[in-house]
Image (cartoon, rainbow, N blue to C red):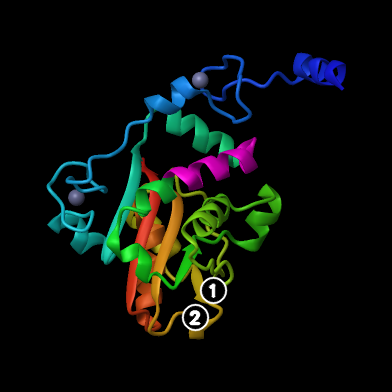
Amino acid sequence: MKRLSQLLDLFFPNVCLVCKEKLTNNHCICEKCLNELVLLDIKKCFFCGENPAQNGLCEHCKKELDFDEFVSAFKFDNVIQSLIHNLKYNEYMKIGKLLGELLANRLSKYEFISDIDFIIPVPLHKVKERERGFNQSYLISKEISNILKIPLGKKIVKRSKYTRTQTKLTKEEREKNVGDAFKIKYPKFVKEKILLIVDDVITTGATMKSMALLLKKMGAREVYAASIARA
Ligand SMILES: [Zn+2]
Ligand SMILES: [Zn+2]
């Protein structure tokens, strides 16, 4: 067996996804790169990164996003960027687990976390999920759910509209693009409930915002949001 693993190593060397150094652990990233991750300052707004914040958002961003509280973990630097990129296209199982673990660690320090009834990953449209083979927000959420023992509500919200890739759109176009993109499939798991939406990266916030608005409209008591990073 040793020879087989050496042979595999030759063709598929187990290297750190970020620095490409050979790995001595069984993860996807080396200790050195993991230690380079920069945690966001909890006293500043997690969205604009500038102003002092209460519940993760400054006054300005709070008006814009309307989450009861927002939590983000890391600065969107090289390390996070290569993890998220590979999560989308490559070794997604291992990375999803790692990112979920990191975000769970941060979330565990918040009081609201013990009140959450369901974690809701931002859903992908079923066509997109089929193409990709997985939903990255779901992988992260699943890990958080395991670690923090909070039920996962994978199917509560569904994406009913196949939206274009958002990266090249302006803020207004994005908001229009995601408006009515979601449908609540199981309203009884929303009404009077306290929910946590999870996504990998938050960019303009348009996607999470439109989900939060819909959940509130359907009677959710409180809606929290969390992301690995803010791009
Ligand atoms: Zn490395
Ligand atoms: Zn802000």
Would you say the magenta stretch is mainly helix, strand or loop? helix
Which of the two discs, 2 and 1, labels the residue nearer the N terminus?
1
Query: Left or right: 64 with respect to 194?
Result: left
**As drawn, is 7 to the left or to the right of 27?**
right
What residue appears at the point 36 percent right and 48 percent down from the top-left corner?
Answer: 106
Q: What residue does disc 1 label? A: 156
Q: What residue is at 54 percent from the left and 52 percent from the top? A: 143
Q: Is residue 191 above or below residue 71?
A: below
Quick check: 195 left or right of 49?
Answer: right
Q: How many marks?
A: 2
The quarter in which the C terminus is drawn is top left
The quadrant holding residue 224 is bottom left
Dots 2, 1 in contact, CB < 8 A: yes
| Callout 1 crowding tier (Cα within 10 Å): few <14, some 14–19, many ≥20 | some
Question: Which numbered dot is residue 189?
Answer: 2
| Residue at horizontal 36 percent and vertical 66 percent from the top | 114
Mark 2 and mark 1: Cα distance apart in space: 7 Å
The magenta segment: 89-102
